[in-house]
Amino acid sequence: MLADDIKKAAEILQKGGLVAFPTETVYGLGGNAYSDDAVASIFAAKGRPQFNPLIVHVAFPEDAKEIVSFSDTAELLVKHFWPGPLTLVLPRKDTRISYLVSAGLDTVAVRMPSHPVAHALLAEAKVPIAAPSANMSGTLSPTSAADVKASLGSRIDMVLDGGDSEVGVESTVLDLTSPTPALLRAGGVTVEEIEKVLGTPLLKPAASHEQEEVNVPRSPGQLLSHYAPGLPVRINVLEPSSTEAFLAFGDSVGNATLNLSPSGDLKEAAANLFRFLRQLDVPEKYSGIAVAPIPHTGLGLAINDRLTRAAYPR
Ligand code: AMP
Ligand code: MG
């Protein structure tokens, strides 16, 4: 029975497991947004070579209001388009949301899906669910449970079958953190519909987000959504200077300020990455952040991608 499956899926999510579930746009690969470990598992399962911020899915607008600070514009848009394929990027309010979800940013993207199975699952799980599309990185977004099984198969704990997704394109993503709402990604709700409700045009930056897979920025500052520490970052460091914070990895190094994973586990390192960078980003205490070499395999690709951007001269 579907109701039993939903209950089982909610329990898996609460325990930190991964569940693919139907939404009206595409199937999502869900994990508990409070858990760094669950979110790291999402990236590991997708084989995504980058940490892009993920959308946090909620059952009710009230849940979103606990996660982010709503503005009048957010209220207006939610009244018109939720539940539905519209994602809003707003200032983070809830510090329990994993920083890996927001790729280190002080903003969080939230959405309330309209698919009845997604809604039932989110209501039952009672925790916010981070979910990108449920496909291997670089492959087509999945619109059926069969698509998900073919792509991610045994890499996840459960696929909740809710039939085919109706929209088939991803949600529209709007950045509401500056005075003029900006389109970050075109999607299920059209620009015209949104502008009609707002009564003003959206900002449409030339470098607005496409599918994350083709999103190769030429410099780290170019993407609106890229967190970089305020302190200078050096990577592949074996010997930090006496004034630098040292972010270590593995057990071969001494004098670590923090260690991403003493046992050399890349998933643990991914789960800790943004939280630790933020903890070390203290100009009053350190002259910079030196990071030990990270193996370039598995999640190490995404970790190194992010560190390379953070270390790019500014
Ligand atoms: P996906 O998870 O594949 O549906 O993609 C999520 C989209 O939302 C990507 O384009 C992200 O860059 C964007 N996004 C999610 N969170 C944020 C955020 N905090 N700031 C800016 N963009 C975001
Ligand atoms: Mg995707």
Image (cartoon, rainbow, N blue to C red):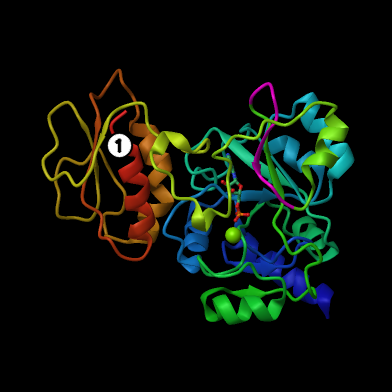
The C terminus lies in which quarter of the figure? top left
The N terminus lies in which quarter of the figure? bottom right
Ligand 2 quadrant assignment: bottom right
Horizontal side, residue 239 vs residue 301: left or right = left
Looking at the image, which is closer to me, 99 or 232?
Answer: 232
Q: Is residue 30 visible?
A: no
Horizontal side, residue 168 vs residue 158: left or right = right
Please count the marks in the image.
1
- Residue 148 lies, in percent from the top left, at 63, 75
Give the residue at mark 1: 312
What SS does tag 1 mark?
loop
Helix, strand or loop for the magenta stretch, by majority: loop
- Residue 281 lies, in percent from the top left, at 35, 29
Q: Is residue 185 magenta?
A: yes
| Quarter where residue 267 is shown | bottom left
Q: Which residues are magenta?
A: 178-187
| Quarter where residue 18 is shown | bottom right
